[in-house]
Structures are given as C-alpha cells and as structure tokens.
Amino acid sequence: MRIQRILAPLICSVLFTFGMTPAFAKPLVALTLVGVIAEKDAAGKSIMVPVESVQPKPGDAIHYTITASNTGSDAARAFVSQGRIPAGTAYEAGSSTIAAPGHIEFSLDAGKTWSAKPMVAVKNADGTTVMKPADPAAYTNIRWASGKELAAHASAAYSYVVIVK
C-alpha cells in the first residue's frame, strides 16, 4: 500500500512532465479521388461528367483530382500524396504541377521506386545499352511531395490527367 502511494504521484508527475496530450494530438488525413471527363450536353456545351457515370472511349481525357483534408489537431509533416495511373490509360505529360518547395515524382513499377524523371534502359543497334527518359505513357503512379506540412484543418488538392488508350 505504501508503494502505491509513492508511485501514484510519481507516475502522474512523469505523465504531466512529458505530457499526455501530444500522444492524442495527431494529424488525420483523408484522401478523396474525383475523376471527370469533358462531355457535350444536348446544347453542345462542354460539361464535366463523373468518370463513374460514363464509359470512357479511347482518346478521352480523364481529369483526376486528389484532395487531402487534414481533420486532425496537428499538422501532417512531410506530407506526400499519390495517385495511380489506371491500366488502359497513359499519363498526359506536364498535366500536373506543384508549387516550390515541392516536387512531383513518377513510378514505372507500381510505386516500388520513384523518380522525378524516370529512366529506362534502351539497347542501341550496336548492342550497347543507354539510359533514356521513360515515355510518360509507361508511368504507373504519380506522387506529390509538397515540401511543407499540411496544417490541421486544412486541405490541399493535386490533379493530373490521363488519356484513355
């Protein structure tokens, strides 16, 4: 009983000194993906239609937007968002941007490796192999590293375009 009386104030003191609140305060980021395709309405006016409600045709451009919303009480530090380039589509080069200090990276292998300028090995006619920039149509994933935190109760949007093959 004497040990409990001594330890209880000590444990409370340690918890107060190091703080229990930070253990519960954390970022909580939810990602929402929306895809739209430009279609013509009955009057011939261009409208954006959710990709789920149409059958995409070869040559259609699908505009994707990923919205990251931090509903947590702390900032999400070193926040990175990523999207997939769906099978049967090709990334449209230059369709995504990010403000400095952020950068965009691409993957050729479903997100195992990343690079701002993916390279592929190409064999020359003489049998030598050289590294050349990959065709954006070969990209499988895209990610945005903003270089800054996503503040608590804030949102950020990232967009890209793919072309249906």
Image (cartoon, rainbow, N blue to C red):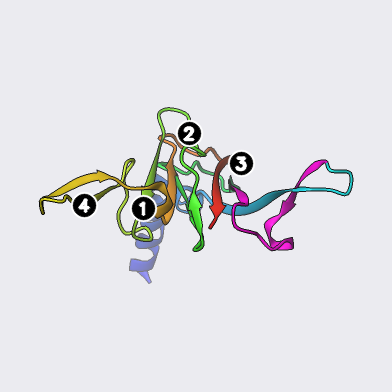
Indicate which disc, 3 or 2, sits on the residue closer to the N terminus: 2
Q: Secondary structure at mark 1?
A: strand
Q: Quadrant of residue 6?
A: bottom left
Q: Residue most toward the bottom? A: 1
Q: CA distance from mark 4 to mark 3?
A: 44 Å
> What type is the residue that disc 1 sits on?
Ser
Q: Residues within 10 Å of mark 2 (few under 14, many from 20)?
A: some
Q: Which residue is mark 1?
A: 107
Residue ID at (48%, 53%): 90
Q: Quadrant of the N terminus?
A: bottom left
Residue ID at (36%, 53%): 107
Q: Secondary structure at mark 2?
A: loop
Q: Secondary structure at mark 3?
A: loop
Residue 66 image position (x, y, % from top left): 57, 48
Indicate which disc, 3 or 1, sits on the residue closer to the N terminus: 1
Indicate which disc, 1 or 2, sits on the residue closer to the N terminus: 2
- Point out the frontmost of discs 2 and 4: 4
